[in-house]
Image (tube, rainbow, N blue to C red):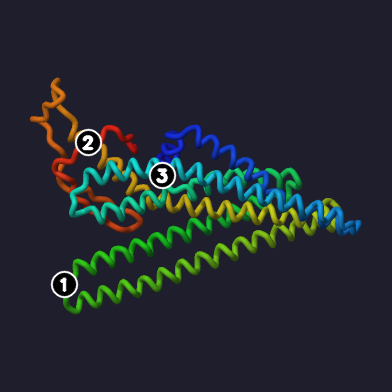
Amino acid sequence: MFSEVTRRLAAKPILATMAAVLSIFIAILGLMLSVYAAQVMGRFTAHGQMGTLVTLSVGLVVAIAAEVTLRTLRHRLLEGICLTADDTLCVEVMSRVDESALGRAVGALEMVCGTYSAAKIAAFMDVSAVILYLTALWLLSPGIGVAATATMMVAIGVEVTLSRISTVASAGRDGTRGAIFAAPPDGRLIAAVIKWMDQGSRMARVCNARESAMGAANGLAYAFVLGVGAVMVVDGTLSPGTLFGIGLISSRAMGMALKATGVWADLRRAQPAMEAVIRFLSESRTASAPVGPAPTARTTSSPKTGAWGFSCLGQAFSLPTQANAPAHAGHGDPS
C-alpha cells in the first residue's frame, strides 16, 4: 500500500530528501514546548526571576515560528511532488476514458489523488518525530518510556479497530446508494432511500464514537504517564518540571501516532483503486502499442475496449474505455 507513496517520493528525490530533512528539524523544534515547560517549572518558580521567564518565552515563540515555517515549506515541497504525479495520472486516465464516463473518472481520480496527498505523506514523515519523542522519554526515564509506549500501542490498536468498523459501515452505505439507482420508481425506491439515510445516521454514530474513543484514549494515556511520573517525583528520582515536560511530549507523540494510523487506514481503503488504475493504464498502453518491425503497423493490435471497473472506498466505478485513445508516451508510468 506504500508503493505509490514511495514511487511519488522517488520520482523527485531531491525534493523528497529536503522534506525528510525538514521533518527531522520539525521534530526537534517540537520538543521546545516541553523544554520550556520544564525550565519554567524548575527555574522560574524556584527563583522568581522575570528575566528568566522573558528569555524562555521569547525562545519558545521563535521556536514555534520556526516550526510553522518549516512545516509550511515541507508541505510546499510535498505538494510539488504530489501535483506532478497527480497531473500525470489524470492525463493518462482521462485520455483513455470514453467521453460519457468523464464525470465518473474525475470522481475516481479525486479519491485516488486525495488519498496520496501532501498532507498525508507529511503525516507519515512525522513518524520520525514520534520515534524521537519516545527515545527522549526512554532516556529521561525507562519507566516513563515503558508507560508511554504501552499506552500508545493500546491507543493505536483501538484506532485500527474503530477504523475497520467505520470502513465496513461506509461500504454498506455505498452499496445501498448503488441500489437506489437500480431500484424501479415505486415503493422499493423509497424504501432504498430510507435505508440509505438510516445507514448514514448509524455511520455518523460510528464516527462520533471513534472520535470520542480517540480523545478518551489520549487523555487516559496522558493521565497514566503523569501517574507513573508522580510516583517518581515522590521518590525523588524526577523533578516536577521534568514531569510536566514529559506529559507534553507523550501527548504530542500520541497525537502524531494516531494521525499516522488514520492515514494508514485511508491508504488501505484506497489501495484497490490505485491498483486498478495501474492495471488499466498498463493494459491500455499494451493494447495501443505497435506490433511488428514497422512503427506504424497496427493491423494485429487495436486499443483495448470495454470497461474499467474497480471499487474505491466502498464505491464501485465502471468506466468505459475509449476505442481509439492515443497513447501519451511523454508521461510517466504511474505504476
Which residue is labeled 2 in the image? 327
Q: Residue visible at 64% across and 41% down?
A: 25
Could you tell which of marks 1 and 2 lies nearer the N-terminus?
Answer: 1
Query: Could you say where residue 34 lies in the image, as x and y percent from the top left?
Result: 73, 52
Q: Are marks 1 and 2 in contact (CB under 8 Å)?
A: no
The residue lying furthest to the top in this view is 293
In the rendered image, which quarter contains the C terminus? Answer: top left
- Label for residue 312? none
Q: Amino acid at mark 3?
A: Leu
Give the crowd class for mark 3: few <14, some 14-19, many >=20 residues within 10 Å: some
Query: Could you say where residue 77 lies in the image, as x and y percent from the top left?
Result: 50, 42
Which residue is labeled 1 in the image? 184
Q: Quadrant of residue 226?
A: bottom right
Q: Are marks 2 and 3 in contact (CB under 8 Å)?
A: no
Q: Are marks 1 and 3 in contact (CB under 8 Å)?
A: no
Which residue is labeled 3 in the image? 83
